[in-house]
Image (cartoon, grey):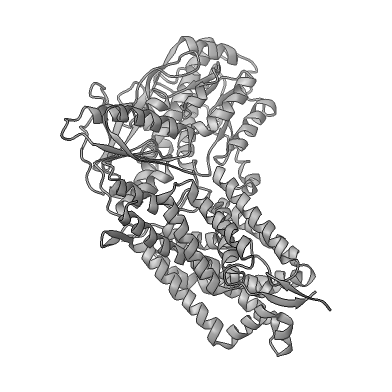
Amino acid sequence: MNPQLLGQSIVLGILTGGVYALMASGLTLIFGVMRVVNVAHAAMIVMSAYLSWMLYRTLGLDPLLSIIVLMPVFFVLGALGQWVVLRRLGGRDLTLTVLVSFGFAIILEGLQGSLWSSSFQAINTAYSLDSFNILGIYVPLVRLLAAGAALALLGALFVVLSRTNLGRAIRATTQDPRSAALVGVNVEYVTTLAFGLGVAMAAAGGPLLGMLFAFYPATHWLWIGKLLAVVVLGGLGSLKGTFVAAMILGLAEQVATVTISLDWAPLVFYLFLFGVLIVRPRGLFGTVARESL
Amino acid sequence: MRRSNRSIAVPGVRPLLVLLVAGSVALAGCAGAATPSPAASAAASVAASVAASAAASAASSGPSASPSAACAIPPCDQPIVIGVSQALTGDKSDPGTAIEHGYQVWIKEVNDAGGLLGRKLVLKEYDNQSLADTAVSQIERLVTVDKVDLLFGPFSSALTIPTSAVAEKYKMAFIEGAGGAPGVFQRNFHYTFFVQPATAEHQADPFVAYLLALPADQRPASAAYPQQDDPFVKATEDGAQKALEAAGIKTVYHDVYPPTQTDFASIAAAVKASGAEVVLGGTIFNDAVAQVQAYASINYQPKAVYFTSGPGTVGAYKQALGSKVNGTMTGDGWVQTSIEPGNAKFVADYLAMFPAEKDIPGEAAEGYSVGQVLQAAVLGTQSLDNTKIADWLHANSVQTVQGNIGWDAVGRPNGSYLLEQYQGGQMKVVAPSADPNKNADPVYPKPKW
């Protein structure tokens, strides 16, 4: 094994893992407060990638800057959707909410297909192919920027969750909605904001996805698989766990590509997941909740 | 009240999650096999387009459009319907759309000249979204429900292999411009005809011949074969790899990725680390673009790069890569500057019909040639009888914009490809030396990305 190649794949793995972490963060946040897997999460990310691509093509807006535009828009739309649709369904049956998100994923995919066709697209900026060399290891500039942006946004999300009243309310709701309500948290309101925040994180992931990888409407099926693996491995609802799991899986994937074979790269992802779940069913950072039946 | 230990927070959620994870793995698998999901198909597959307008006109010229003035085959008031299932969306949409444009140019030419056997031509077309299963059911539908008179093939071997079996079953001549993998011909079909100069395993022959003819001190010592999991690609790559290995050019990298691969960073790193002096990329289109970008971003500078498919879709390829196209090579049966009879008219008509495009994709010429072959067979037999058409094609050769093409008993063409290279942003024919279309010498080593 060529040590330089291994180093190269480890660097790529870490940078890619950072982006996976950002893309999965919204999924884990939404699961935390709602106990619902948002199957449309990856379709929302792809939607954001398309919008960022459009903004770049029509207005020349840098994809990294488009994050600032897209996040508030997605936040509002997400919160609105939660308040108007999901809030009413969730009270009746959680499974229904999953089905609705599944349907929404298909609607988004169809919409993207009819608007932009199902051809592959990618956001190619002037600096897309730039890289710099550290001790013989090439660090692609876009991956570094994407990982940096992901880290900054994850850091901000972490601060929001740990330092603000809203964050404390979200965490309280995540731990136990009924107890949170008892101590005065408006659970419905907090859930709506948390859902909006989760969707906003999806919006942040889109431009990064578009800069790093080609995308097309049906790519979200590939991504939701990866993102679910990340959040389940990390422990559902745990942001810290999501980050660690994304790093592990990003690394495993890139290193498998160069050491074993390309066929194995996607498999390694899931083998790792199943392996960990057998040993530790709650995921790496999942908490063991005690509650009544 | 009983207290229970739950690993995932809420009762009843875990089974659902297991289901979801398993489901998404399965979905990811499905998406791996083919790009778009069935979900979008309902809307998109009804993209039946009628390419023929009723604009009748008598004026025409050119060897390819020689109509018979009076209607020979009734019903004379009905158009001749040609059925197509084409990859207009999905991962093969760029080349698929290009072929479709070639069909349209040919149909317009024929209709402007009064039609075929005195009847207008109409294209009955479905979008198969680059999905083989969808293409198969669409061909079934075209034959049994739409009852089309004639069929054209789809883009790429992956779709031609299953759809040609349907055509064979119904004894419909299946003239196709983009299915040249061995799998197309191994079943000894009588009704399938591949309209390119040669089959896939010979596509890279001119490139191999060129490398092996280099002076010993310039000849590369090693080659890398990163390739998509695709029957056409595999045939081309295997053919080239075998020939280069036999000549002592070592294989230092060989790996296969799925058609849905979008991350090429680690692949590029591995190819670079292998030290390969030349790269034979087994690509369709998007992956060729992504490979170039990934190589450029880690400053990997091989002496020569050949892609099985991708660079030939000239406009889209140049748009994606800009000046980074220079130096890349591919094998093709056609080039825009070709001096083949009828090519000047095709080029002029194509540019008139698609004024936004300056560079005509090679696949459009393949589609146009398919039309030329069908036209020759229909005129040759004075019939729409598909068995007569197939028999005629086995016995004759046809002058197309890709050259004169004839077929063996299973529909394999009998010519050879051109080696093309981008130089100064233009696609040039650089080999074989004896070919009258050659208009530049190969640049080796290629310029840096």
Asked if residue A20 can be seen in this view, the reply is no
Residue at the spot 38% in from the left edge and 67% down from the top edge? A145
Up-down relation of residue B255 to residue B332 (above or below)? below
Residue B313 placement (x, y as % from top left):
39, 39
Furthest toward the front, the residue is A279
Up-down relation of residue A60 to residue B23 (above or below)? below
Furthest toward the bottom, the residue is A183
The quarter of the picture where residue B343 lies is: top left
Quadrant position of the N terminus of chain B in the picture? bottom right
Furthest toward the right, the residue is B1
Residue at the spot 45% in from the left edge and 47% down from the top edge? A262
Residue at the spot 60% in from the left edge and 64% down from the top edge? A232
Q: In terms of depth relative to the viewer, which is nearer, A100 or B251?
A: B251
Up-down relation of residue B141 to residue A99 (above or below)? above
Up-down relation of residue B298 to residue A98 (above or below)? above
Residue B436 placement (x, y as % from top left):
25, 22
Residue B235 placement (x, y as % from top left):
43, 30
Residue A257 placement (x, y as % from top left):
43, 51
> How many marks overall?
0
Residue B320 shown left or right of residue B209 in the figure: right
Q: In terms of depth relative to the viewer, which is nearer, A28 or B315?
A: A28
Q: In terms of depth relative to the viewer, which is nearer, B350 or B197?
A: B197
The quarter of the picture where residue B207 lies is: top left
Asked if residue A13 can be seen in this view, the reply is yes
